[in-house]
Amino acid sequence: MWLKPNRALSRRDLRRLIGVLAALALTTAGLGAWQGNVFAPLFALVESSAVAFALGVAWRAGDRSERITLDASSLEVQSLPGRRCTRFQPYWVRVQLKDGTDRRRLLLTSHGRELEIGAFLADEERAELSKKLMVLLAALNRQPRR
């Protein structure tokens, strides 16, 4: 399974949005400068740059993802872009949904270790993922050992 956060804009759409916002800010600043506010264009440039930077940072946060691989010998969770990889034995791993202070957490636990997965998903998506993982693990554990 490949878990990714929902992203509303493509890179091209993000550039278009930033361009439209900058054009609106600079147009408004041009009108202000025409009426005597000589600092309006400078402020619009600074503000447009800050908004573009903030939107870019927020958009890049959507690049994070988790890849979950399950086979007879291991359950592996690889976090990207950090390339952190955690392995569990599928027979011993337990899937838990715990209520937190502001959201429910989906945890994989085994042998005293726990790993939160799907932190960027909505609560309903985390609940659906937990059910799917429980079904897959139960089916794997019912198979005869070789």
Image (cartoon, rainbow, N blue to C red):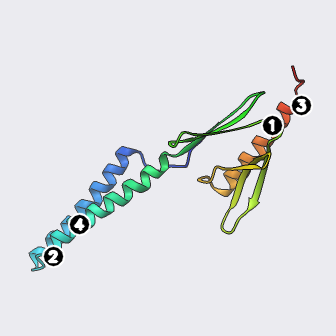
Q: Residue beneath label 2, please?
A: 32
Residue 82, relative to residue 103: is it above or below?
A: above
The amino acid type of the residue labelled 3 equals: Arg
* Nearest to N terminus: mark 1 or mark 2: 2
Along the viewing direction, whichever of 128 and 70 lies nearer the viewer: 70
Alpha carbon distance from label 1 to label 3: 9 Å
Horizontal placement of 127 versus 143: left or right?
left
Alpha carbon distance from label 1 to label 2: 64 Å
Q: Residue beneath label 4, please?
A: 46
Q: Residue beneath label 1, please?
A: 137
Camera-side mark, 4 or 2: 4
Q: Residue beneath label 3, please?
A: 142
Residue 1 placement (x, y as % from top left): 65, 36
Are dots 4 and 2 in contact, CB under 8 Å? no
Q: Secondary structure at mark 2?
A: helix
Residue 34 placement (x, y as % from top left): 9, 74
Residue 35, relative to residue 109: is it above or below?
A: below
